[in-house]
Image (spheres, rainbow, N blue to C red):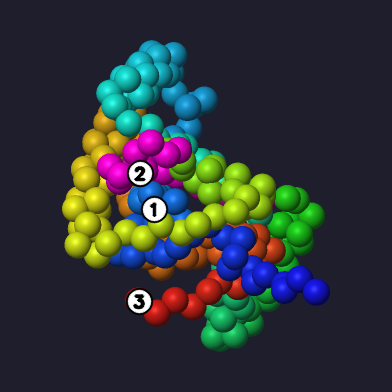
Amino acid sequence: MAKALSSQEFVPIKEIRDGILITDDGNLHMILMASSLNFALRSGEEQEAITAQYQNFLNSLDFSVQIMIQSRRLNIEPYLETLREAERNQTNDLLKIQTREYVEFVRTFVSNTKIVTKSFYIVVTFVPPLLGIGKKEGLGGIFKKFMGGEKRIPKQVADEKFEEYRAQLWQRAETVSGAIASTGVRTVPLNTEELVELFYGLFNPGELERGRAPQVGI
């Protein structure tokens, strides 16, 4: 009888170190969380300017990046719990009733309407020189491997080389952040704990919708 594989065998992530994601192919990745802007509410001139700046951003890059949009059903439970706590501490009976009715209104509205939040990420990848002939894959490449189930042989990143590769990856990330800032989009790199939570949510979407997230000790 074939031995059952653990779930870890299907996740092509070797480790997350100092905010750097290292995949089994030996490539290093940084994930930048990007802010959003309401393009539709901008004037025609502003839209043209943003489009031109975004085009300049893409043309300024001499390496590939990947842009990912994640949609997730809004988890309103922490907000509702805050309101319930305020209700319990309220001494005015009228305000207590109004708070309770507001909680019920929000809960009913959200349960009857599918409200989703969108998060935007930019994946910056660095392929070590000895691996340069391989595929330059971003977050999508990770999921291609995950869904395809292809055999993976983890490649080691030597400790003495990690800092060198990390510095070059940071330079790329700073280039991306600076260039895209001209469009009005701000970016911030995810740290180790945030990366763990991101991938936990991607592989276990139902858990985060229920307000469950992994506890990570850094």
Q: Earlier in the sequence, mark 2 or mark 3?
A: 2
SS at circle 3: loop
Residue at the image position 66 percent from the left and 47 percent from the top: 148
In the depicted structure, whether residue 209 falls above or below residue 39: below
**Residue 123 in magenta stretch:** yes
Residue type beneath disc 1: Gly
Answer whether residue 191 is visible to the viewer in this image.
no
Q: Do the residues labelled 1 and 2 touch (CB within 8 Å)?
A: yes
Q: Give the range drawn in magenta.
A: 115-135
The residue under label 2 is 131
Does residue 47 appear to the left or right of 163 in the view shown?
right
Placement of the N terminus among the 4 image quadrants: bottom right
Residue at the image position 74 percent from the left and 56 percent from the top: 109
Crowd around label 3: few <14 · some 14–19 · many ≥20 (10 Å): few
Residue at the image position 25 percent from the left and 58 percent from the top: 162
Tell me, for residue 218, which label it has, or none: 3
Residue type beneath disc 3: Ile
Q: How far apart are marks 1 and 2 (CA)?
A: 7 Å
Q: Which of marks 3 and 1 is nearer the N terminus?
A: 1
Residue type beneath disc 2: Leu
